Amino acid sequence: MRLPFFHPGPPSGDDHDGLSGGLCASTCLLVGGILWFCLCLGLSLWLSSREGGAVLVAEDGQPVLASGDWLRHRDRLDDLMRQTLSRVMPGCRLLTMPGFSEQEARHYRVEGDGAPLRLALALQERLCQEALRTGPDGERLLADDVPMPQLRWTDDGVLEADVDGRTCLVLHFPGWETMLATLSRPMPEPALVLVIDDMGQKLEPAEQLASLPFPVALALWPHAAVRRSVQQVARDMGLDVLLHMPMEAMPRKNGTAPNPGPGALETDMDAYAMEHALDKALAQVPTALGFNNHMGSGFTGQRDACRMLAGLAYGRGLFVLDSVTRGNSQLENSMVRQGIVTASRHVFLDDPQGTDKVLAALDKAARLARKQGIAIAIGHPHASTLRALERWENREGVAVVPLRRYVWHLAQLRAGQFGKPE
């Protein structure tokens, strides 16, 4: 049986029309399929950028954020910064700097009274908090899906926040640039920090301290007569300020109770009364980096009172210095538990008083700094203390650093627990 044989001649008219119609239909299907594929691909890429599904890879092989992810994290950080600013520097204004597109870092100028370093500390507290999640057994773990932004100060005194190596927020603080620029430098070792308590009653001691060849921090009573003038001197001369917070003292041996002054924190206060006292005191010294205790031997020995204070201080960007006016103080430990940047005094300079005794105490503090890397010494604006500071030769050759540099150093060490250190 022979199979039919088809001659390769020209097709008939009916055959030609059928072939042409088939090709047109195939072409339409092909074009439609291509268009549908492109539409789906574009929609998928758009959704990925919105949902964070796109994963990019840097040259070193590490994943980096897609553009949509970065913008989302930038906006979230912007919201956190605004919330933090309203609490830490309530009297300040946040002004948007023009000339930057919506796809770039946001640039702001912060104007008004306040302590810019406190904003950085408070923002870092919030970031560390957001970087944690709770594990199945209640333990606190790093959240894998939350990139830890890095905060850093530039040589120009500008605060920058980076997400995944890309700057997303830039904060300028007019008038503070010179002081803040020192925060970009690494902390030297050995280093000595000097704090002078009981400031604000007279202006002359502040001016005398400001003329020293090394920095000192001024701890001001919240209700001192010339506290505003002293804060201005400190700002003009690049000195740091602390709130010298009155706290309850232990009774004397004869049973009388020392008076720490108005607005003191008492061990029998409830949370509302304690917060009110702290708020009122901080409002009197808005440029303070934080506070240390005036007296306080009764308060700092009570664990419950110190923990309540730590809870109230959290989120404000406060540095807390324990003056250690008693043994077994609970203040520093309570702050550490709460995640607050804190430290303790190592040496009292003028107990006892006398120029030679203060000079010996300064040398002791310098030797201690050389031994352990850092030391904090506290003195008072007595005439003998001021003379000793003017005459001190610093034979140990330790670096006397501004308090703010040590505070930021401690903050960076804490941030290193939650992400890559800078």
Image: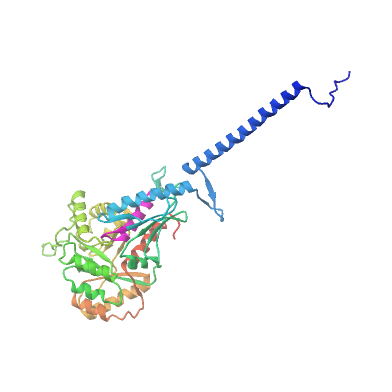
Is there any visible trace of residue 217 in the rendered image?
A: no
Residue 376 in magenta stretch: no
Name the foreground residue: 406 vs 1.
Answer: 1
Main secondary structure type of the part rendered in magenta: helix
Q: Residue furthest top?
A: 1
Please give the name of the residue rendered at 27% of the width and 67% of the height, measured from the top-left corner.
235
Give the side of residue 252 with respect to residue 402, left or right: left
Please give the name of the residue rendered at 38% of the width and 44% of the height, measured from the top-left corner.
138
Is there any visible trace of residue 263 in the rendered image?
A: yes
State which quadrant residue 288 falls in. Answer: bottom left
Q: Quadrant of the N terminus?
A: top right
State which quadrant residue 22 falls in. Answer: top right
Q: Is residue 19 above or below residue 421?
A: above
Q: Position of residue 349 (x, y in %)?
A: 25, 73
Give the side of residue 334 with respect to residue 198, left or right: right
Name the foreground residue: 114 vs 35.
Answer: 35
Q: How many marks?
A: 0
Q: Position of residue 333 (x, y in %)?
A: 30, 58
Q: Quadrant of the C terminus?
A: bottom left
Please give the name of the residue rendered at 35% of the width and 69% of the height, measured from the top-left corner.
374
Q: Residue furthest right?
A: 1
Q: Position of residue 219 (x, y in %)?
A: 23, 66
Q: Position of residue 170 (x, y in %)?
A: 39, 57
Q: Which residues are magenta?
A: 110-130
Give the side of residue 387 with respect to residue 422, left or right: left
